[in-house]
Image (tube, helix red, strand yellow):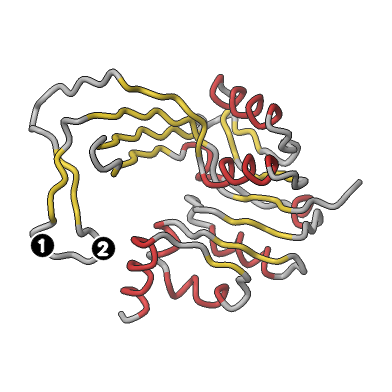
Amino acid sequence: MKRFDVITIGSAVRDIMFRTTAAEIIKNPQHDPTKVSLIGFEYGAKIRSEDVHRFYGGGAMNTAVCFARLGLKTALVVRVGRDSDGQAVIQHLRSEQVDTRLVQHDSGMNTGLSFLVVETKTNEHVALVDYGANDHLTLSRQVIQKNPQWWYVSSLSTKRWPQLVRQLTKTKALLAWNPGSTQLQGYRQMKPFLKKTELLLLNKDEATELSARTTL
């Protein structure tokens, strides 16, 4: 069997996006460099949106689909519930030619769900996320032995993320890492793995947060 070009590791969720003009972008009066702007609504108001979208999301899922569309042999390691959302996630991945044999199924947890509110003037957004089964993601010996050319690690919601990343850094595959808020809050735990990271991916807010924590 041909070696995978990339295996993505992280989360898979169902996304529901509400776009609205009712949101207000507010400058944070506390001058917190990690929370420069806030999104606000009238207290107690019922906000109506006629621009609602339902997507598939999660860092590992989105990147796996992108890599597959680029023609790379791609698999992913995520954890979904044994529910209708989990089935829909699997069907979507297969339709995008992503190998799903490493997907984990959880009988006790629901598939992750993300609710996004988008302010339409600026396209800034807030995401409310229930990671569900993703919180219990593990890495088996079977996964590690796949030894792809690249590991792509997105945001990990599990508290055991240092053990997962440590397993990957012991392989010969190259590591691309897009750490999430859980990882950025634990810079001391991240630090040993950064030396073994070939490609570190951060947006502006994440880079600001990481820089702030390196000076603490």
Give the secondary structure at mark 2: loop
How far is the residue under mark 2 from the one under mark 1? 11 Å
Q: Amino acid at mark 2?
A: Thr
Q: Residues within 10 Å of mark 1 (few under 14, many from 20)?
A: few
Q: Residue at x 70, y 51 (%)?
A: 7
Q: Which part of the image, by quadrant, shows the C terminus?
A: bottom left
Position in image of residue 143 (x %, y %): 75, 51
Q: Amino acid at mark 1?
A: Gln
What residue sits right under mark 1 in the picture? 30
Give the secondary structure at mark 1: loop
Residue farthest right in this picture? 1
Q: Does residue 35 appear to the left or right of 112 in the view shown? A: left
Q: Residue at x 53, y 46 (%)?
A: 59
Res. 34 mark: 2
Position in image of residue 27 (x %, y %): 13, 54
Say which of 20 and 184 sits in front. Answer: 20
Position in image of residue 54 (x %, y %): 44, 24
